[in-house]
Amino acid sequence: MSRRLPKGGRLIDRSKSLGFSFNGKEMRGYAGDTLASALLAEGQVLMGRSFKHHRPRGIVASGPEEPNALMGLGRDGTFEPNARATTTELFQGLEARSQNHWPSLENDFGAISSMLSRFLPSGFYYKTFLWPRAFWKHVYEPAIRLSAGLGKPPMRRDTDHYEHFNITIDVLVIGGGISGLAAASAAAESGADVLLVEQDPAWGGRAPVDGARIDGMSAEEWIGSTLQSLQSMPNVRMRTRTTGSGIHDHGYVLLHERLTDHAPEHSVPRHRLWKVRAGQVVAATGAIERPLSFAGNDRPGCMLASAVRDYVVNYGVAPGERTVILTNNDDAYRTALTLREAGLGVSAVLDTRQQATGPLAAAARDAGLNVRPGCGIAGIVGRNRVDGVQVCRQDSDGEVIDVIQADCVAMSGGWSPATHVWCHAGGKLSWNDEAAHFAPDPARPPTGVDGMAMMQVAGSASGAIHSGTALESAHAAGVLAGKALGESRGRKAGRAPAGEDEGHQPMEPVWLVPARAPYAKRAKSWLDFQNDVKVSDIELAAREGYESVEHAKRYTTLGMATDQGKLSNINGLAILSRELGAPIEEVGTTTFRPPYVPVTMGAIAGEARGELFQPVRKTPIHEWHEANGAHWEPVGHWRRPYAFPVQGESVHDAVKREVLATRSGVGLLDASTLGKLVVKGPDAARFLDMLYTNMMSTLKPGKCRYGLMCSENGFLVDDGVVARLDGDTWLCHTTSGGADRIHASMEEWLQTEWWDWKVYVANVTEQFAQIGVAGPRARDLLNELGPSMDLGREALSFMAWTDGALGNVPVRVFRISFSGELSFEIAAPAGQARALWDRLLEAGRPLGMTPYGTEALHVMRAEKGFIMIGDETDGTVTPQDLGLHWAISKRKDDFLGKRAQEREHMTDPLRWRLVGLETLDGSVLPDGAYATDEGVNANGQQKTQGRVTSTYYSPTLDRGIAMGLVERGPDRMGEILEFPVIDGEPVRARIVNPVFHDPDGEKQNA
Amino acid sequence: MLILTCPYCGIRCDETELAAGGEAHLKRFGPGSSDEEFEGYLFMRANPKGVHFERWRHAYGCGKWFHAARNTATLEVYGTYPAQVHEPPQEVLDAISTRVPGWRWKDVS
Ligand SMILES: [Zn+2]
């Protein structure tokens, strides 16, 4: 049973008791506790159930590498799943719940599936896919979905807030242990601006627990004095609770700072994402202890030896009363000695090495501990937790030579440098046989913009796991980082701090305990606790041919859980290498990817949520729409009124009313989102002739022309009316969503292909509002406003424009029509557009004038057979497909898309081409519906011969109308096609001319 | 998240300020070109591990297009220069040669 010790705990404040709850049960801990230490102090060893087999699991680690103790924290708007208990600081009122069990942690139904575990081998998911499809859909998937998974996603909107920081810094030091402190000091002393971050709430890392001595001081004293000196330097900034999450190109680093997780009563942002540009990054990220693989190593009570030590020293918590140490190195003896000093039982120190000769082993023997070299663990006694340990010879197949009573196993398989951030940016690793770990290869560092190393590695992260060498390497890393910025700062770092180490006996790699463990034991020796991957799973993957480490990883899911294999990586590689008979360095590691530990979605979003997620573009008339009940439609970043339903009216009825009112009287449209690009210069005519398929150079000033733009691929990308303003100035209208894109494309051609042409382009979309006035009474309405110019049929003919004033507002009036009615589009300066709109409304009242939205606009253009970019086009449609041959100049040598349109496929007579579609029953065809054809294609699918591109109820015709692309469509007028629909009989439609309304265009010429 | 210096305004641009434009120094082929020439212009792109020439636009800055010579493996940037040229300037070629002796990119070396 774990419990709180009567004294000790360097990080807790016993005068501050805090209440919290676990699975609804009230518990107490101290300020400075983590949730993990507080739970252990309350005797809670069982923390959750494993992902696949629902095995009971307890705490393994004391830091972010923890695979098992994942909790759901908080409730409602502050609920967060999958929080690691080991990095969750305790606060008054914290609510925690364990995960992945039903109905309760102690009695879990899913645990039954662990009895079926031999039916869940590695690659289970892939293999299952091969079974009959119906089985997968109805049997396996529902069962797996029920039983798999970690925490549940929150159901409420997050009530916390988050923010982003952007910062540029000379040197960023990641990790605030003694190595990080030494590196930061060296870099700062050489004159660099330094940012030093530490993931834990406290500085100093492991050194105080491990009892290092530095410069003749205790680790704690040295840390205190070094912090003081760093804090006094104006060029040093320091942050705790801040994790180096990912290192990216050219010194771009993401840091994840937790500001109020430990103190939710504060109103500052909960998390902060730092976007750092660092000249040099120093990784002082430490090392992570490895578990050992023995049968039952996942039983609650089996922990990393360093974690056992941490709980005793940092939190005054005993993980167990009687601990068995299992180790292949000297470091775990520190745990034995620490436990002994705290008055706790150490049943035995099982050392897999044949001899235990180091000074620490000697100290353990001197303290009266039972050191047993050459021994290992054959199995664990106990179901839901450790009750005893079966001892065997390490060099055996697991014959039990002894059973020891114990409630805790402290295991140490050696230390692996935390090389994740080094690898994120492309740093390479090399294998160190002596220490049996991968360490950063200083000869192959991540490189920066100048091709030189942008990262240094300090302390145990470099493989220097003893404090003396660690501090030397850290100081050197800090000096190098400072130097990389140039000698100009002219300052020199002091000397390296001197760490004092005991001598030590080399570790001996052990990848399986005992060495010749039979299958039954290997199938109970866990590598990846979180994803339930065992030694036998890796062996199976290797036997099935997964020789590449990346393949074996995906096949078995080793290291693919939220802990990203921090504990399992090297152990898994070693098993794979053993099975393949290849050295570990040849098998290699899997790729380390950011983030180092999970980052909250809130931190990633920062302030960009709600209204700030994506700014809404508003036309000058937006507020009127808002006040008049507009039903909105997003168009690019704009919001446009879809329709203006009046009280009690449906949107559909509103559209119908708006269309009929416009066709019979006059309608008013806010067309301000229309793209407006001014193209000007001596070479503007030549430029536009290249951009448009039409001839624009021959357009007369005062006139307009409908133009098409293609990509170099020959496909239609935009359309719009072009007006020639004067000899060398054109105004090009683009689609509402297209202005920025077309403007950028014009700039691209001018800057990168025809840079000697004298042309300027200006995007004036937002400088001018545009108001459409359409309908038989359109001219009457404008004349009500006392125009300064003649708007008569001859004076302003169809496809002409004129400048003037309307209701005292300076305007440019274009006589163009997208509705097929007599129509004027009025451009007015954005600042005066609302006034003009209001005057038009007022003057229009006696005429029954009706504002209309985008849907009425679309319906009316479809009634006229006008195409819409994005409906009739999708990036694979040519102007010729749409019957727009008349808008493609034959007299021009060249224009964008011309060469492509000569390609064979583009002139194929079987291409799908534009037609109108008229349902026989008058119904509205479903959008995107396909017309079926006889037979099947090469994939055995029903052949198709066309599809619907636009489809509407036409109020003018009181029936459904549609446009579509049909194979040889225009040659098949009158033929009937079948369009299958979901849940119903196919709809039959006749191929007709796409112009449904006023085919001779008499109305727009009125 | 690269950093590229805009040769027009001199700003060291964060990649978020830039828009990538693919391979640099393409020659446009229009009407009259052969199918092979046109295919090469429209579709064929180099994808080297090592020295590469790319087009970038300082989209959220001065708006200008420029070229960057950089290494896709080490991420070293050898130089940036205005887009209004048909081939890389000599000083950029020299800068690459000092760092990658014997390099070659398409017809450039
Ligand atoms: Zn610029």
Image (cartoon, grey):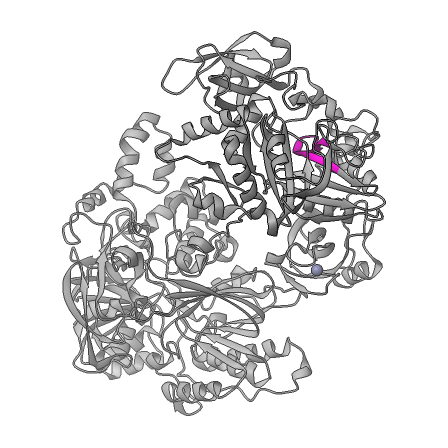
Q: Is residue A447 left or right of residue B84?
A: left
Q: Is residue A869 left or right of residue A438?
A: right
Residue A258 position (above or below residue A119): below
Residue A977 position (above or below residue A1003): above
Taking the view exactly as shown, the residue that stands out farthest to the bottom is A216
Name the quarter where the N terminus of chain B is drawn: bottom right
**Magenta highlight: main SS:** strand
Residue A246: percent from the left, percent from the top?
49, 62
Residue A22: percent from the left, percent from the top?
18, 62
Quarter of the rendered image showing ligand 1: bottom right
Asked which quadrant contains residue A912, the reply is: top right
Q: Which residues are magenta?
A: A705-723
Residue A254 position (above or below residue A190): above
On whether residue A362 falls in the magenta region, the answer is no
Residue found 74% across the figure and 54% down from its top: B67
Residue A247: percent from the left, percent from the top?
52, 63
* Of the pair A890 and A247, the residue shown nearer to us: A890
Residue A73: percent from the left, percent from the top?
26, 60
